[in-house]
Image (cartoon, rainbow, N blue to C red):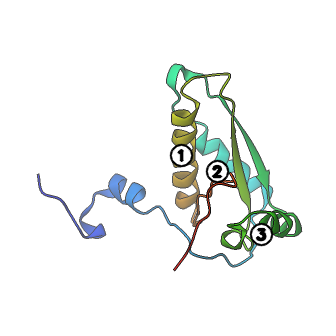
Amino acid sequence: MTWCTRLEEYDSLKRIIAGVKYARRFTGERIELPELINIIELARWAPSIGHIQPWEVIIMNEPREIKRLARLHPAGYLFEQAGALIFIVLDPDQSPHYMIDGGSLTAYIALAASIKGYAIIIVNLEDSHVYKTE
């Protein structure tokens, strides 16, 4: 088997996965709550070890609140114009594998959002992680 470098050479399922859109900046256009719930509904099929799903999901789509949060975080400039924010809150007391499970959910949210036509950016909200763009 050879490695394909051109997207059009992938079959339809591979195109979906390879086509996840990552944003460098956002337009500020708001994403409505029913659309966000639809994305979460698609992503809820994410596997977790032992099927524990040690997470909660918080959705923020109010532009003023997104800008307020952006001012509080060193990497806030990355998401201050986002149409919505989806927070994944993990509970380490529910599973020793919470980070793996959280990564699984993150990937499924990214895939679901991309299928719906949205670009994403993944930001860790811990203060110890500062992101730089070029």
From the viewer's perspective, tell me whether residue 18 is left or right of residue 1.
right
Tell me the crowding category of disc 1: few under 14, some 14 to 19, or many 20 or more residues within 10 angstroms, Cα based.
many
CB within 8 Å, label 3 to label 1: no
45 lies above or below 110: above
Q: Which residue is mark 2?
A: 39
Amino acid type at mark 1: Tyr
93 lies above or below 27: above
Q: Where is residue 37 shown, x and y percent of the image?
A: 72, 48
Can the viewer see residue 46 in this picture? no
Q: Which residue is mark 1?
A: 108
- At horizontal 41% and vertical 57% (from top left) the residue drawn is 16
Q: CA distance from mark 3 to mark 2?
A: 15 Å
Which mark sits nearer the N-terminus, 3 or 1?
3
Q: CA distance from mark 2 to mark 1?
A: 9 Å
Which label belongs to residue 30?
3
From the viewer's perspective, tell me whether residue 68 is left or right of residue 117.
right
